[in-house]
Amino acid sequence: MNESFLDLDEVEIELDEAALEALDEKAFKEHRDNRDAAIRDLLDEWLKAHDSDEE
């Protein structure tokens, strides 16, 4: 896996209303209403799923 993206300081994404609601729900249920933690968790899940697809 190419890890050159790890040098990035900032990433910007656009989420639709449904994705934002799901993110807020995850943040409330699993991360004490911490949206940043929920984003990191979802990104980690996505990266792991994406990495396993390449193998």
Image: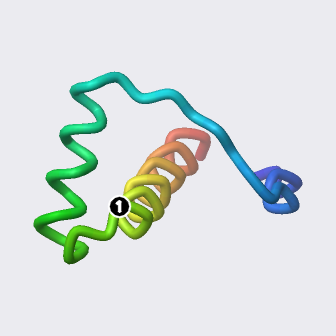
Residues 51 and 11: in front is: 11
Residue 45 shown left or right of residue 11 in the figure: left
Identify the residue position indicated by label 1 in the image: 35
Is 30 situated above or below 18?
A: below
Q: Residue at x 32, y 69 (%)?
A: 34
Is 11 situated above or below 4?
A: above
Q: Position of residue 14 (x, y in %)?
A: 51, 28
Residue 8 shown left or right of residue 52 in the figure: right
Q: Position of residue 20 (x, y in %)?
A: 29, 37
Callout 1 amino acid: Arg
Q: Position of residue 37 (x, y in %)?
A: 40, 69
Badge 1, how many Cα within 10 Å: few under 14, some, many 20+? some
Is 15 situated above or below 50?
A: above
Residue 15 shown left or right of residue 33 in the figure: right
Q: Quadrant of residue 31?
A: bottom left
Residue 7 shown left or right of residue 18 in the figure: right
Is 8 situated above or below 17?
A: below
Residues 5 and 1: in front is: 5
Q: Residue at x 22, y 68 (%)?
A: 33
- SS for dot 1: helix
Q: Residue at x 22, y 51 (%)?
A: 24
